Image: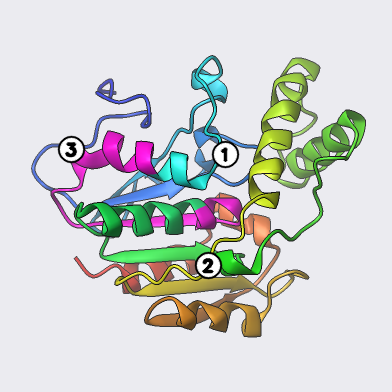
Amino acid sequence: MTQPSTRWLLQEPSPGGRPLLFAFPYGGSGASSLRRWPGRIGEAEVHAVQLPGRENRIKDLPCRDFAAFAEEAVRELGPYLDRPYAVIGHCMGALLAHAFTFRAQQSGAPMPNRLFVSASLVPQRGFYGLYHPWMSDRRIAQELRRVSTGLGDGELPDEVVALSVPVLRRDVRMCLDYAPPPQPVDVPVTAIGWSRDLDVGPADLAEWRQLAKSREVMLPGEPLAFLTAPRELRAVVEDDFEY
Protein backbone atom coordinates (compact mmCIF):
# COMPACT_ATOMS: atom_id res chain seq x y z
CA MET A 1 0.00 0.00 0.00
CA THR A 2 1.45 3.35 -1.06
CA GLN A 3 1.36 6.06 1.58
CA PRO A 4 -0.79 8.98 0.42
CA SER A 5 0.61 12.48 0.00
CA THR A 6 -2.39 13.85 1.94
CA ARG A 7 -3.78 12.81 5.32
CA TRP A 8 -7.27 13.01 3.79
CA LEU A 9 -6.75 9.63 2.12
CA LEU A 10 -5.61 6.28 3.49
CA GLN A 11 -3.96 5.22 0.24
CA GLU A 12 -2.43 7.02 -2.71
CA PRO A 13 -4.56 6.78 -5.86
CA SER A 14 -3.00 4.80 -8.66
CA PRO A 15 -1.12 6.77 -11.32
CA GLY A 16 -2.34 6.78 -14.87
CA GLY A 17 -5.60 8.69 -14.63
CA ARG A 18 -7.92 5.89 -13.48
CA PRO A 19 -11.37 7.29 -12.49
CA LEU A 20 -11.78 7.86 -8.75
CA LEU A 21 -14.75 7.57 -6.39
CA PHE A 22 -14.28 9.58 -3.19
CA ALA A 23 -16.51 8.24 -0.38
CA PHE A 24 -17.28 10.44 2.62
CA PRO A 25 -18.02 8.80 6.00
CA TYR A 26 -21.28 9.25 7.85
CA GLY A 27 -21.60 11.16 11.12
CA GLY A 28 -19.45 10.00 14.04
CA SER A 29 -17.31 7.74 11.90
CA GLY A 30 -14.10 7.79 9.92
CA ALA A 31 -12.77 6.20 6.78
CA SER A 32 -12.68 2.76 8.42
CA SER A 33 -16.50 2.71 8.40
CA LEU A 34 -16.20 2.06 4.66
CA ARG A 35 -13.71 -0.80 5.02
CA ARG A 36 -16.24 -3.27 3.56
CA TRP A 37 -16.31 -1.40 0.28
CA PRO A 38 -14.36 -2.92 -2.61
CA GLY A 39 -11.24 -1.20 -3.87
CA ARG A 40 -12.88 -0.73 -7.23
CA ILE A 41 -16.42 -0.34 -8.59
CA GLY A 42 -16.45 -0.76 -12.33
CA GLU A 43 -13.49 1.20 -13.65
CA ALA A 44 -13.43 3.55 -10.65
CA GLU A 45 -10.95 3.23 -7.81
CA VAL A 46 -12.67 3.72 -4.44
CA HIS A 47 -11.06 5.96 -1.82
CA ALA A 48 -12.60 6.65 1.58
CA VAL A 49 -11.96 10.22 2.73
CA GLN A 50 -10.53 10.62 6.22
CA LEU A 51 -11.80 13.70 8.04
CA PRO A 52 -9.65 15.45 10.67
CA GLY A 53 -10.26 14.71 14.34
CA ARG A 54 -10.94 10.96 14.06
CA GLU A 55 -9.13 7.62 13.81
CA ASN A 56 -5.58 8.13 12.51
CA ARG A 57 -6.27 11.88 12.48
CA ILE A 58 -7.62 12.01 16.03
CA LYS A 59 -5.09 14.71 17.01
CA ASP A 60 -5.95 16.97 14.08
CA LEU A 61 -8.26 19.93 14.66
CA PRO A 62 -11.79 18.90 13.60
CA CYS A 63 -13.65 20.91 10.99
CA ARG A 64 -15.84 23.61 12.53
CA ASP A 65 -18.54 23.63 9.87
CA PHE A 66 -19.35 22.40 6.38
CA ALA A 67 -17.86 25.42 4.64
CA ALA A 68 -14.52 24.99 6.42
CA PHE A 69 -14.56 21.28 5.64
CA ALA A 70 -15.30 21.84 1.96
CA GLU A 71 -12.63 24.49 1.51
CA GLU A 72 -9.92 22.29 3.06
CA ALA A 73 -11.08 19.09 1.37
CA VAL A 74 -11.12 20.63 -2.14
CA ARG A 75 -7.65 22.05 -1.53
CA GLU A 76 -6.19 18.80 -0.17
CA LEU A 77 -7.77 16.54 -2.79
CA GLY A 78 -7.08 19.02 -5.59
CA PRO A 79 -4.07 17.11 -6.99
CA TYR A 80 -6.34 14.13 -7.71
CA LEU A 81 -9.13 16.03 -9.46
CA ASP A 82 -7.41 16.11 -12.84
CA ARG A 83 -9.12 12.87 -13.88
CA PRO A 84 -12.75 11.70 -13.99
CA TYR A 85 -14.09 11.41 -10.45
CA ALA A 86 -17.32 11.16 -8.50
CA VAL A 87 -18.23 11.71 -4.85
CA ILE A 88 -20.57 9.71 -2.65
CA GLY A 89 -21.76 9.94 0.93
CA HIS A 90 -24.37 8.55 3.28
CA CYS A 91 -26.47 10.72 5.64
CA MET A 92 -24.01 13.36 6.95
CA GLY A 93 -21.53 12.04 4.40
CA ALA A 94 -23.99 13.01 1.66
CA LEU A 95 -24.06 16.57 2.99
CA LEU A 96 -20.25 16.56 3.00
CA ALA A 97 -20.19 15.30 -0.60
CA HIS A 98 -22.60 18.03 -1.68
CA ALA A 99 -20.64 20.73 0.20
CA PHE A 100 -17.44 19.49 -1.47
CA THR A 101 -19.10 19.69 -4.90
CA PHE A 102 -20.50 23.16 -4.26
CA ARG A 103 -17.08 24.42 -3.09
CA ALA A 104 -15.37 22.93 -6.14
CA GLN A 105 -17.90 24.78 -8.29
CA GLN A 106 -17.36 28.07 -6.44
CA SER A 107 -13.57 27.84 -6.55
CA GLY A 108 -13.25 26.78 -10.18
CA ALA A 109 -11.79 23.39 -9.28
CA PRO A 110 -12.56 20.41 -11.54
CA MET A 111 -16.09 19.18 -10.84
CA PRO A 112 -17.09 15.58 -10.19
CA ASN A 113 -18.83 13.70 -12.96
CA ARG A 114 -21.52 12.61 -10.49
CA LEU A 115 -22.72 13.31 -6.96
CA PHE A 116 -24.20 10.30 -5.18
CA VAL A 117 -26.20 10.98 -2.00
CA SER A 118 -27.61 8.22 0.20
CA ALA A 119 -30.29 8.57 2.88
CA SER A 120 -30.10 12.33 2.90
CA LEU A 121 -32.48 15.26 2.81
CA VAL A 122 -31.40 18.29 0.79
CA PRO A 123 -29.13 20.51 2.93
CA GLN A 124 -31.62 23.38 3.17
CA ARG A 125 -34.06 21.12 5.03
CA GLY A 126 -31.79 21.27 8.06
CA PHE A 127 -31.05 18.76 10.81
CA TYR A 128 -32.98 15.52 11.14
CA GLY A 129 -32.63 12.08 12.66
CA LEU A 130 -32.19 10.38 16.00
CA TYR A 131 -29.13 12.09 17.41
CA HIS A 132 -29.06 15.40 19.26
CA PRO A 133 -26.12 17.17 20.96
CA TRP A 134 -27.91 17.18 24.32
CA MET A 135 -27.98 13.37 24.44
CA SER A 136 -25.91 11.96 27.28
CA ASP A 137 -22.59 10.26 26.59
CA ARG A 138 -24.16 7.05 27.82
CA ARG A 139 -26.99 7.29 25.26
CA ILE A 140 -24.60 8.08 22.43
CA ALA A 141 -22.38 5.17 23.45
CA GLN A 142 -25.42 2.88 23.49
CA GLU A 143 -26.31 3.89 19.92
CA LEU A 144 -22.74 3.40 18.73
CA ARG A 145 -22.75 -0.12 20.19
CA ARG A 146 -26.15 -0.82 18.62
CA VAL A 147 -24.91 0.14 15.15
CA SER A 148 -21.76 -1.92 15.55
CA THR A 149 -23.72 -4.99 16.62
CA GLY A 150 -26.24 -4.52 13.81
CA LEU A 151 -23.42 -4.55 11.27
CA GLY A 152 -22.05 -7.79 12.68
CA ASP A 153 -18.96 -6.21 14.20
CA GLY A 154 -19.76 -7.34 17.72
CA GLU A 155 -19.34 -5.28 20.87
CA LEU A 156 -17.19 -2.19 20.50
CA PRO A 157 -14.27 -2.00 22.96
CA ASP A 158 -14.74 0.62 25.66
CA GLU A 159 -11.70 2.58 24.49
CA VAL A 160 -13.12 2.84 20.95
CA VAL A 161 -16.46 4.04 22.31
CA ALA A 162 -14.71 6.63 24.47
CA LEU A 163 -12.96 8.05 21.38
CA SER A 164 -16.07 7.90 19.22
CA VAL A 165 -18.56 9.65 21.51
CA PRO A 166 -17.02 13.15 21.24
CA VAL A 167 -16.58 12.71 17.48
CA LEU A 168 -20.26 11.93 17.03
CA ARG A 169 -21.28 14.74 19.36
CA ARG A 170 -19.27 17.27 17.32
CA ASP A 171 -20.71 15.97 14.06
CA VAL A 172 -24.26 16.22 15.37
CA ARG A 173 -23.63 19.79 16.46
CA MET A 174 -22.18 20.64 13.06
CA CYS A 175 -25.26 19.19 11.35
CA LEU A 176 -27.65 20.93 13.74
CA ASP A 177 -26.12 24.29 12.81
CA TYR A 178 -26.32 23.57 9.07
CA ALA A 179 -29.30 24.74 7.03
CA PRO A 180 -27.85 26.76 4.15
CA PRO A 181 -29.91 28.42 1.43
CA PRO A 182 -30.31 26.20 -1.64
CA GLN A 183 -26.91 25.55 -3.24
CA PRO A 184 -27.46 24.27 -6.79
CA VAL A 185 -24.62 22.34 -8.43
CA ASP A 186 -23.95 21.85 -12.10
CA VAL A 187 -23.42 18.12 -11.59
CA PRO A 188 -25.95 15.30 -12.04
CA VAL A 189 -27.12 13.74 -8.78
CA THR A 190 -28.17 10.20 -7.96
CA ALA A 191 -30.31 10.31 -4.81
CA ILE A 192 -30.38 6.88 -3.17
CA GLY A 193 -33.02 5.80 -0.67
CA TRP A 194 -33.59 2.64 1.34
CA SER A 195 -36.88 0.78 1.69
CA ARG A 196 -36.64 0.59 5.50
CA ASP A 197 -35.54 4.18 6.07
CA LEU A 198 -38.09 5.95 8.30
CA ASP A 199 -36.53 9.42 7.85
CA VAL A 200 -35.91 9.80 4.11
CA GLY A 201 -38.56 8.65 1.64
CA PRO A 202 -39.12 8.97 -2.12
CA ALA A 203 -40.63 12.46 -1.86
CA ASP A 204 -37.61 13.64 0.15
CA LEU A 205 -35.21 12.23 -2.45
CA ALA A 206 -37.10 14.03 -5.22
CA GLU A 207 -36.22 17.37 -3.58
CA TRP A 208 -32.65 16.97 -4.86
CA ARG A 209 -34.15 18.06 -8.21
CA GLN A 210 -34.21 21.56 -6.71
CA LEU A 211 -30.41 21.57 -6.71
CA ALA A 212 -29.40 19.58 -9.78
CA LYS A 213 -30.47 17.29 -12.55
CA SER A 214 -31.33 14.29 -10.41
CA ARG A 215 -32.67 10.79 -10.50
CA GLU A 216 -33.92 8.82 -7.50
CA VAL A 217 -33.25 5.16 -6.75
CA MET A 218 -34.82 3.09 -3.97
CA LEU A 219 -32.79 0.13 -2.74
CA PRO A 220 -33.95 -2.67 -0.42
CA GLY A 221 -33.02 -2.82 3.25
CA GLU A 222 -31.88 -0.67 6.14
CA PRO A 223 -29.98 2.56 5.44
CA LEU A 224 -26.83 1.23 7.12
CA ALA A 225 -26.63 -1.40 4.39
CA PHE A 226 -24.76 1.38 2.61
CA LEU A 227 -21.70 0.53 4.70
CA THR A 228 -21.52 -2.96 3.24
CA ALA A 229 -21.66 -1.73 -0.39
CA PRO A 230 -24.36 -4.22 -1.41
CA ARG A 231 -24.55 -5.42 -5.00
CA GLU A 232 -27.54 -3.18 -5.79
CA LEU A 233 -25.68 -0.07 -4.62
CA ARG A 234 -22.54 -0.97 -6.56
CA ALA A 235 -24.67 -1.45 -9.69
CA VAL A 236 -26.17 2.05 -9.30
CA VAL A 237 -22.72 3.61 -8.93
CA GLU A 238 -21.34 1.72 -11.91
CA ASP A 239 -24.34 2.63 -14.09
CA ASP A 240 -24.41 6.35 -13.22
CA PHE A 241 -20.70 7.17 -13.03
CA GLU A 242 -20.05 8.23 -16.61
CA TYR A 243 -16.32 8.39 -17.11
Q: Quadrant of the C terminus?
A: bottom left
Q: Find residue 181 and name its label.
A: 2
Closer to the camera in the image, 188 or 240: 188
- The answer for how far apart the CA atoms under marks 3 and 2 are is 29 Å
How many angstroms separate mark 3 from mark 1 (CA)?
24 Å
Within 10 Å of the Cα at label 1, are there few (<14), some (14-19), or many (20+) other Cα atoms?
some
Q: Which residues lie in the magenta part?
A: 71-95
Picture coordinates of residue 105, whole percent (x, y): 28, 59
Labelled pair 3, 1 in contact (Cβ < 8 Å): no
Q: From the viewer's perspective, is the residue at label 3 or at label 1 nearer?
A: 3
Return the residue at label 1: 33
The residue at the far left in this view is 16
In this view of the protein, which residue sits in the foreground, 73 or 152? 73
Disc 3, disc 2: CB below 8 Å?
no
For numbered disc 2, what is the local secondary structure?
loop
98 lies above or below 45:
below
Please report the residue visible at 47 percent of the width from the left and 82 percent of the height from the top: 209
The reply to whether residue 105 is visible in this rendering is yes
Among numbered discs 1 and 2, the one appearing first in the sequence: 1
The three-letter code of the residue at mark 2 reads Pro
- For disc 2, the neighbor class at 10 Å (few under 14, some 14 to 19, many from 20) is few
* Mark 1: secondary structure: helix
**Scheme of colours in the image:** rainbow
Q: Which residue is mark 3?
A: 79
Q: CA distance from mark 1 to mark 2?
A: 30 Å
Which of pointers 3 and 1 lies earlier in the amino acid sequence?
A: 1
